[in-house]
Image: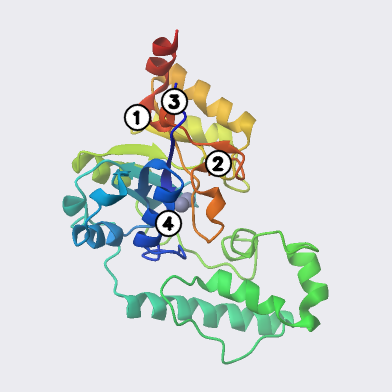
Amino acid sequence: MNNNKIDLHIHTTYSDGQLGVKEILEYAKENQIKAISFCDHNVLGAYSFLENMIVEDYEIEIITGIELNFTFQNNNLHMLGYDFDWKKMNEGKYINRKNEKEIIEEENKKLEFLKSVCKNQGIKFDENLKIYKSNQLASTVMKYHMMEFKENDEILDKMLGKNREKSFARGYVHNPNSPFFIDETIGLPTAIDVANLIHSCEGKVVLAHPFDYKDINHKQYIQDIYDLGILDGIECIHTRHGIEQIDYIKSFCKKNNLLITGGSDFHREQKQTLGYGANGTIPVTEEYCLKNYTQIEDHER
Ligand SMILES: [Zn+2]
Ligand SMILES: [Zn+2]
């Protein structure tokens, strides 16, 4: 088995990533990553950008990808789509075609709400705080803003932990029991809706990072979505999947004849994590490139 690295889960500035398409391609080439997929949230901007670029020079295989939000049992969850006709999908119902200005306006509305909750909770903030870039999420901006004020230290110790290691988004903004709760599941498609869209564009439906959620029974979740009969594969390697979780998914895929995939869920400039999962410790090798696990094993024997 050769050890070429791939990365099938990368975000760009078209969603909430911090690097552009070109920068990621350059970095992937430097690091000899053989195949990548840009999987922005509900948008395909990276692929229209690539249309106007000569990508052959990079010698990297680009597999079309997207990460679509869906709702299941009142949770806001993620499904990956791969290897589809992107132009066809770009006409699809669940693709976000809002322009930059509209996206920024939407996040600023959420930010205003978060400010009003801060006021009620006695958390200090600057009334003039605003979002100016379309890749900035209200929850992230608010978290780092609150941290700027020493006066908030005590309350933030309780909310986010001493090292601020807890996620403000997951623990508060997406938590129905928190005053900061913003219901982002309103109007979201179901798992079957997003799978139908991906399949109608000749793509593969891959369940994204099933172990990367708080407050759900992960193994039950995998089984429940599998039982819908819509999956072609499951994302095995991911930044926040540990080795036991990767093994669990692999054996589930083997048992049920599903494809395995892997990616870093790359967002920020910690470039060393490109091509690695499990918090930067496990390389994503070519066997995770939408391949059938059973076939790989037979081949190795
Ligand atoms: Zn995700
Ligand atoms: Zn992602």
Give the labeled residue for mark 4.
11
Asked if labels 2 and 4 touch by Cβ distance under 8 angstroms, the answer is no
Asked if labels 3 and 2 touch by Cβ distance under 8 angstroms, the answer is no
Give the foreground label among 4 and 1.
Answer: 4
Q: Earlier in the sequence, mark 3 or mark 4?
A: 3
Where on the picture, by quarter, is residue 294?
top left
- Residue 37 image position (x, y, % from top left): 36, 47
**Relative depth, front residue between 231 and 261:** 261
Q: Earlier in the sequence, mark 4 or mark 1?
A: 4
Q: Name the outermost residue toward the top.
A: 301
- Going 58% across and 66% down the picture, which residue do you hit? 173
Q: Earlier in the sequence, mark 1 or mark 3?
A: 3
- Residue 213 image position (x, y, % from top left): 58, 47
Give the labeled residue for mark 3.
2
Name the disc covering residue 229, or none.
Answer: 1
Q: Secondary structure at mark 2?
A: strand
Q: Amino acid at mark 4?
A: His
Name the disc covering residue 97, or none.
Answer: none
- Ligand 2: does it lie within 8 Å of the C-beta at label 4? yes
Asked if labels 2 and 1 touch by Cβ distance under 8 angstroms, the answer is no
Spatial CA span between label 4 and label 1 = 28 Å
Spatial CA span between label 1 and label 2 = 27 Å
- Going 68% across and 78% down the picture, which residue do you hit? 146
Spatial CA span between label 4 and label 2 = 15 Å
Is residue 71 visible from the viewing direction of this image? no
Near mark 3 (Cα within 10 A), the count class, few <14, some 14-19 or many ≥20, is few
Q: Amino acid at mark 3?
A: Asn
Q: Is residue 259 above or below residue 198?
A: above
Give the labeled residue for mark 2.
277
Where on the picture, by quarter, is residue 270?
bottom right
Q: Secondary structure at mark 4?
A: loop
